[in-house]
Image: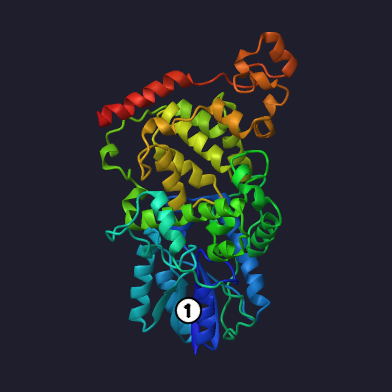
Amino acid sequence: MVAILWFRRDLRVHDHPALQAAADRHEQVVPVFCLDDRLLHGRHPSGPRTSFLLECLNDLHGHLSSRGAGLVVRHGPPEAVLPALAEAAGAREVHVTRDDGPFGRRRDRAVRDALAAAGVTMHAHPGLSVVDDVRDIMTGQDRPYTVFTPFYRNWQRIPRRDPLAAPGRISMPAGLRPGELPALTGLGLRQDVPEPVAGGESAGRARLDAFLAGPVRDYAAGRDLAADGGSSRLSPYLRFGCLSPRSVEARLPGGEGAEAFRRQLCWRDFYHQVLLHHPGNAHQEFQERYRGTLAWNRDEPGFTAWTQGRTGFPLVDAGMRQLLREGWMHNRVRLVAGSFLTKDLGIDWRRGEAWFMRWLIDGDQASNNGNWQWIASVGVDPQAPYRRIYNPALQRERHDPAGRYVRAYVPELARVADRYLDEPGQMSAADQQRAGCVIGRDYPAPIVDHRAARLDALARYQAVTG
């Protein structure tokens, strides 16, 4: 008997329940990935993220080949590709890792119906989240959670399955046309990020090993320090399923640092279940009172300055330039940059969400959307808007106290003295010349007054809430 294993956001061979089920129940397995233009060129196209995807697929093909199979690549809508492939291979089952995102659910319904019409059954398995199914986590009133802390308490109590080893051997039918991975340019996209991380399960496992070998112990204290390497940098590999979230959790040691990282894995599950139960969040505010009522500014020069890292606020600019350079940004700085866009500039959070999804290699709709609504004070976060207005100078002092992060990504400020690092415009003309940073020529003056912008932001929200 033959089964198809349809890879999506689970590009690995270790701890892969769908792959294990297909291999256990069938003599032969056809691993396949469908390049779907609705994702490649849909709402959030991204050259950097697709480049990473292609590297992941190439690495996956290597892992499969070493086990006797290989990756079949098809370009087209899966509701058309998979029934045709099932007929060619003589398959009667398709196994997948469950994807509960809005697009994933619509796509899977269409694929399931198309396969059923061809006499083929589709089976969904866990593997995208730490817990097997985020739908199992409900309040005492059998409602989905909209506040993180009680979700976290319940999440901790959910039973866990044991991670699975990679299959030793995968037999694949002979005679199937494997197809080829295209070049990024062949998909009509380009790699705009000069310093991306390498994609694939091999790279992800190596990074996880390095994190667990030491940095995880200091994660609780160091994760918010922008320049000190406290971040795990595992998010791109979790985004594409190069690493199993469950297996990552299972490998965590004891201690405060490991528990702080485990909490971050829970945030990922939390936002997945929020979007699952509230798919409208993909386009509108979770809080109904803010839908169409907040007076967003149409500040095109401000938005352009923000995207280019030219706002005159060094921590914000450093983060935005890191995004353009690496396709990644430190999580704390993401929040500062998001606060600046939505609160200081008063620009619609959806524009920031879309910009991040264009550039972030780890761009995940649920987490990105949840974080943008959180910082814009329109999502599931119960805190008042003033709690999410971040002062970029204070944030820099707390999370980049030596200025290493700012100076690494904003080299114009490399020779600026510490006391002027947050407000380089306060330097005298002579100091600017000595630092090689003339304001207005080498580095911009601040595009807004933060104190005034804070008051304006509070007034915008107050106008809605009364």
The answer to whether residue 207 is seen in the rendering is yes
Residue visible at 66% across and 76% down in the picture: 65
Q: In the rendered view, would you say 103 is above or below 339?
A: below
Amino acid on which the number 1 mark rests in the picture: Leu
Q: Position of residue 187 (x, y in %)?
A: 54, 57
Q: Position of residue 91 (x, y in %)?
A: 46, 85
Residue shown at the point (54%, 79%) measured from the top left: 20
Question: Percent x, y for residue 375?
Answer: 43, 38
Find residue 175 and report its horizontal and vertical position in percent.
Answer: 58, 85
Does residue 317 appear in the picture of this structure?
no
Picture quarter with the C terminus:
top left
**SS class, disc 1:** helix
In the displayed structure, 240 sits above or below 296; it is below
Characterize the local packing of mark 1: few (<14), some (14-19) or many (20 or more) Cα atoms within 10 angstroms.
some
- Colour convention: rainbow
Q: How many dots with numbers?
A: 1
Q: Which residue is mark 1?
A: 85
Q: Residue furthest front?
A: 255
Q: Single out the residue that lies furthest toward the right.
A: 434
Q: Is residue 444 above or below residue 220?
A: above
Residue at (67% x, 54% y) in the render: 211
Q: Is residue 148 left or right of residue 392?
A: left
Q: Would you identify the image quadrant in which residue 212 lies? A: bottom right
Q: Residue at x 46, y 72 (%)?
A: 96
Left or right: 66 as drawn, with respect to 458:
right
